[in-house]
Image: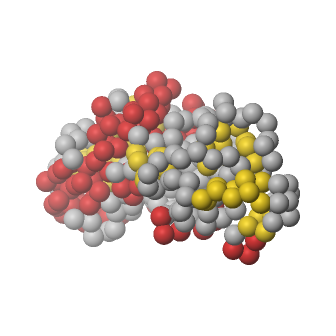
Amino acid sequence: MGALVTSIRQVSAAPSLSVDLAAVAANTRRFVSLARGSVMAVVKADGFGHGLGDVARTAVAAGATWVGVTSLAEAVGVRESGVDVPVLSWLNPVDVDVRTAVRYGIDLSVPSLHHLAVIEQAGPVRVHLQLDTGMARDGAAPDAWLALMSAARRAELAGKISVVGVMGHLPCADTAGANEAGKRALLRGVEMARQAGLRPSVRHLAATSAALTDPGTHLDVIRIGAGLVGIDPSGTTRLRSALRFTAPVVQVRRVAAGTGVGYGHAHVTDRATTLALLPVGYADGLPRAASGVAEVWLAGCRRGRRGDLDGPGRGGRRG
Ligand SMILES: Cc1ncc(COP(=O)(O)O)c(C=O)c1O
């Protein structure tokens, strides 16, 4: 796939992908300043592809006081990268290696009685009791919560676990008004935990979208993943992108209106057009879905099949 542009300038010697950790730091600071409580940097999936240790260390240096991941292996990677704030792992299998969690000082989520039974055998371990607040993905169903609270209290009294937090996750966080049910469910869950004699010190529910659009969901900790690297799933806020993909222009040609361009003539020019060819495609990690719709920043302007789009260099269409 060669991206289409309407003006040219050599932008770099070879295709290259770079991560801007200053952008991660700036995004983290932004969440730290808007949070009503603390910020947990979620660095699952290799820090959303930006580097697990780099993103975790940068976010913590910029003010995040928790780190979150979705596997114990990632949690160990975070610890080994030198991070010493509390690290929480969720989405763990029921046979999670609790001894390793204890050795590395990792908090574990507890979404079921079954998980609790395994975890308490190898404790003491710090846990966050996880309630399903509407996503049907992870966490105990509301009708299983009472039994989980009673068992957690017994395990805590026996010195096997220490209940640090209660967590939920919001299914439709970027839909106005859709978070109330999840928030009510979480607060009810916390109340039941207290009635069972537990004293969780942190309640957490919101990820990037809810953190940006619904401060009422912040509670004690917001868990920010995509937002750290510059992605706002809610589409409301311009964050700083931490990823940059550059490529050289290797060919330029002038074509007439009505010229079919690329595989299947994915684009047909509607006017005389200058095409520039960038030698990048699926093999470089560009999603196939970007065919014909990808845009590039070239010579001070964002450009795509519709011509010049925006940017300081926009000076009218050159055709
Ligand atoms: C429970 C939980 N919280 C927070 C996040 C981070 O979400 P986001 O990337 O929207 O900030 C995730 C990501 O998968 C998650 O599973």
Residue found at x 51% / y 53%? 248
Residue found at x 32% / y 60%? 71
Q: Nearer the viewer, residue 228 or 149?
A: 228
Residue found at x 66% / y 64%? 291
Q: Nearer the viewer, residue 85 or 238?
A: 238
Q: Is residue 131 left or right of residue 198?
A: right
In terms of image quadrants, where is residue 77?
bottom left
Residue found at x 41% / y 40%? 20
In terms of image quadrants, where is residue 311?
top right
- Figure disc tally: 0
Q: Nearer the viewer, residue 281 or 223?
A: 281
Using the image, determine if residue 205 lies above or below residue 32.
below
Using the image, determine if residue 246 lies above or below residue 199.
below
Q: Is residue 271 left or right of residue 33?
A: right
Instruction: Look at the image and tell me whether residue 204 can be seen.
Output: no
Instruction: Look at the image and tell me whether residue 260 can be seen.
Output: yes
Q: Is residue 3 left or right of residue 317?
A: left
Using the image, determine if residue 34 lies above or below residue 96.
above
Q: Position of residue 98 (x, y in %)?
A: 21, 61
